[in-house]
Image (tube, helix red, strand yellow):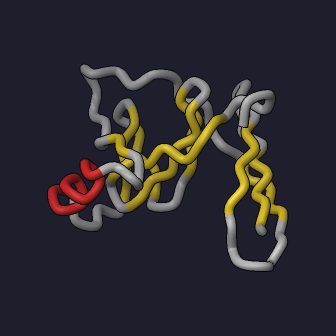
């Protein structure tokens, strides 16, 4: 099992574990706290990878190189914390990955 320890900037501390077979690895990642999405600003769609909605969104947003959050662009595979939610940019779609709350990962 691989563990990614995420130490974000701006008042957010996240811990997130992923499974990569039997390889164990710890990586420090700085994750910006971006606040709540403002519906008046440009935001990429949000989804869970396991949602049926994700596949529909994937067809609508085919391979965008960035995600937008409140008019700010983030490259594919970037992480942000929105409140207590950890999200990753997946080619134009924000995918919820877990919690940014160190007491409730």
Position of residue 73 in the picture relative to residue 17 (left or right): left
x 27%, y 52%: residue:
52
| Quadrant assignment for the C terminus | top right
x 35%, y 41%: residue:
46
x 78%, y 32%: residue:
102
Position of residue 104 in the picture relative to residue 79 (left or right): right
Find residue 7 and report its horizontal and vertical position in percent. 78, 43
Q: Nearer the viewer, residue 86 or 42?
A: 86
Q: Residue furthest bottom?
A: 22
Position of residue 23 in the picture relative to residue 88 (left or right): right
Find residue 74 and report its horizontal and vertical position in percent. 46, 50
Q: Number of numbered discs present?
A: 0
Find residue 80 and report its horizontal and vertical position in percent. 56, 41
Position of residue 32 in the picture relative to residue 15 (left or right): left
Q: Taking 7 as reference, is 91 above or below it?
A: below
Q: Residue furthest left?
A: 60
Residue 60, picture quadrant: bottom left
Q: Taking 51 as reference, is 99 above or below it?
A: above
Residue 12, picture quadrant: top right
Q: Taking 11 as reference, is 98 above or below it?
A: below
Find residue 14 and report its horizontal and vertical position in percent. 73, 39
Q: Nearer the viewer, residue 94 or 99?
A: 99
| Quadrant assignment for the N terminus | bottom right
């Amino acid at each position: 099992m691989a563990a990614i320890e995420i130490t974000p900037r701006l008042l957010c501390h996240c811990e997130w574990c992923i499974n990569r077979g039997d390889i164990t690895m710890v990586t420090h990642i700085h994750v910006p706290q971006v606040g709540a999405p403002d519906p008046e600003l440009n935001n990429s769609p949000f989804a869970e990878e396991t949602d049926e909605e994700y596949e529909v969104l994937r067809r609508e947003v085919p391979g965008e190189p960035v995600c937008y959050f409140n008019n700010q662009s983030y490259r594919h595979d970037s992480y942000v914390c929105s409140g207590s939610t950890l999200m990753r940019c997946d080619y134009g779609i924000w995918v919820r990955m877990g919690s940014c709350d160190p007491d409730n990962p």
